[in-house]
Structures are given as C-alpha cells and as structure tokens.
Image: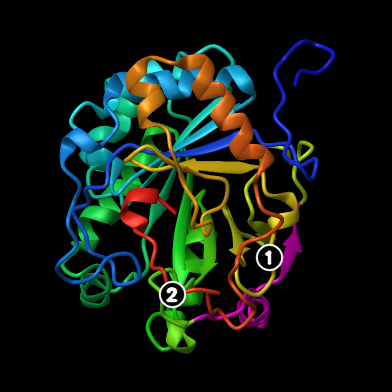
Amino acid sequence: MSDHNDIAVLQDGLKRRINYLRLSITDRCNLRCQYCMPAEGEQFLPRAELLSDAEILTLGRVAAGIGIRKIRITGGEPLLHPNVVELLRSLRALPGLERLVLTTNGLRLAELAAPLREAGIEGVNISIDSLRPDRYAEITRGGDLARCRAGIDAALEAGFFTKINMVVMRGVNDDEVLDFVDLAREHPLSVRFIEYMPTRGDNGDNLTVPAEELLERIGQSHELQAQTHKSSGVMAGPARNYRLAGAVGTVGVISPVSKMFCSSCNRIRVGADGMARGCLFLNEPVDLRPQLRAGDEAGLAKTLQELVLRKPEQHDLTPDGRRDDDDPLAMSRMGG
C-alpha cells in the first residue's frame, strides 16, 4: 500500500498502521534475568542459525521499503554483537527509515554510548529492575549495578533520549517504585513501569502489579499530569506517560496484562533466528531465513506483508496474567 505521497504504508486486517519493527540481532546475553531466562540450561543458538549482518541489513531495507519507519534493536543483549556500531550505522542509513533506537541492559553503554550516538542511534531504553546492588545482582543473576548506572550516565552524556524500563514484580522489587520515580525527578529520564508478563509459561505467581495500582501509589506522593503524544501516535510506544510536578523527567506505565493496548499496536517482531511474529505471543512464527539466504527480496516483502495482514486482534494473555497455552517464549531470542 502507499499513500498520496507514494510512501509505502503497511496496514493489517484491522486497518492498524504497522510501521515499527522490533529486531533482535543476537540471542546472547551477559545477564540471566529471572523473568527472561532460566538460571541454567538455556542453549544459545549456533551462530549459523542467527541472521548475519548482511541478512539483517537486507531485512531492514525490505522492511523500510514496504512501510516500516522505526526499528528498535534488541537482543539478547544487542551490545554483545561483535559489529554492533557499524551494523547500526548501516541500518540507520537505509532509505525510508526515520528512527533507529536500541534496548539494552546498559552494561556496555559506558564504552559504547558515544560511538552509537555518532552512528545515528537516537534513543536507548535501559532495562534496570532494582537500584539496590544486592537485589539487582539477584534479579539479574550476577549483574553489576554500578556498570548499569555508569551506562545510564553515559547515555545521558551522549545526548540520547533515554528511557528506563523497570519490570515491577510484587514482593520482589515493587517497594522501589518511588525510588525510580526519584530518578525521573532528578534526571532527564523517561522512567517506565512495566507489568510483569508470565512469558515462560507460568501464571505469574501473583507477581503482576496492575498499572492502575502503580499510578495510585505514585499519585499519593506526587502530582501526575497525563501527557499526550505530540504526533498522531503512529510511531509512539505503548506507555501512558505522565509529568511530575517539579521533575526533570517523566514517568509512564506499560500495561500488557491489565489494560491491553492491542487496538493501537503498530509493530511486528523478528528474532535473532529470523523468526517473525505479528504479536509477541503469537505461536505461529514465520521463518524468514530461506528467503533472506536466497536473496529473494520480493518474496521477503510479500511474506512480511502477509504476516502483517494476519496480525491478531489481541494477544493471548488473560487479565489474571495467565497465558492461554503453556508454550514458554525464548525472550532472549525475541527481544520482548
């Protein structure tokens, strides 16, 4: 499809405009966060099964050609990719691509923030679920909070639009919500609180804290003013964002469980193994590797367009946080 300016536009069967690709470039990670990977036994894919740099660039070029305007690079931990700066520089130069952003655990940002900014990356999302060193190490199974905090500082110094992602888990780290709010008061950060999703086939063990409960907690000590998207929201994410009186930054909530945002979803996902999904919880992925490895760009474009047309109306997380089936997702390959 194309609009009156002859710029490609992708729409799914429900007339949602799809212009956002989440692209995992590696399944490797230097952490083993409790909600993402098991403590042991997770097998990384052989490198031959992962997309090559050339295949990633071909995918990006074809996606931009059919209407994708924003790509978010994910992992695993994308900064473990051995050629990450040059790969992202090449992606950013693709015709038609308007935004290239990155999600990371921040552990390598202190050394890579400046080169990544120079390569054209505009924004970074940094995952951090505790501001307490011992608890951070426990949740991540060995992570160094000081390195993550240094990465946040480096991102701000490099001039990135910087978001902080905290997965809130009841009885695990939800007592730190106001500590994270203080980060937004003191620094130009967008701090987002994300509901725990039972992606590993569990029922959440009552870990999910509904977004409305989080907003009520924050509102007891802070004045919140809802923000609206400056644009049409076509390339906006799922967060509901709020300004804080007297704060430098903002806070937001992302509620995939308690208040689904599927009706405005604008994204598709491709894993590090080339498996594409129209929805994170769609258990019928499409393997793009045969067309990528055959150099069949026309076929690849058609496959992506068909994937978009089959995009489901909503995901299969039920309101109590249970999944409709017990097939655990390999989040380290899909990138969330």
Q: Nearer the viewer, residue 14 or 80?
A: 14
In x, y percent, where is residue 71?
50, 32
Q: Can see residue 117?
A: no
Amino acid at dot 2? Asp
Crowd tier of the residue under label 2, counting other residues whose Cα lies within 10 Å: few below 14, some 14–19, many 20 or above: few
Q: Is residue 217 magenta?
A: yes
Q: Earlier in the sequence, mark 2 or mark 1?
A: 1
Q: Secondary structure at mark 2?
A: loop
Q: CA distance from mark 2 to mark 1?
A: 20 Å
- Can residue 179 be found in the magenta stretch? no
Taking depth in this image into account, of 95 and 149 the one nearest to the observer is 95
Q: Quadrant of the C terminus?
A: bottom left
Residue receiving disc 2: 326
In the image, taking residue 260 as reference, residue 136 lies left or right, namely left
Q: Is residue 196 above or below residue 299?
A: below
Asked which quadrant contains residue 172, the reply is bottom left
Amino acid carrying label 1: it is Met
Q: Which residue is mark 1?
A: 260
Describe residue 175's horizontal placement relative to residue 266 as left or right.
Answer: left
Near-viewer residue (30 or 166): 30
Q: Which mark is residue 128?
A: none
Left or right: where 222 falls relative to 24: right
Quarter holding the N terminus is: top right
- Name which residue lies at 68% across and 77% down: 212
Q: Secondary structure at mark 1?
A: loop
Q: Nearer the viewer, mark 2 or mark 1?
A: 2
Against 175, is 255 above or below? Answer: above
- Residue 312: x percent and y percent? 66, 53
Question: Vertically, is 260 above or below 258?
Answer: above
Magenta residues?
208-227
Kindly identify the residue that appears in the image at 64 percent across and 79 percent down.
319
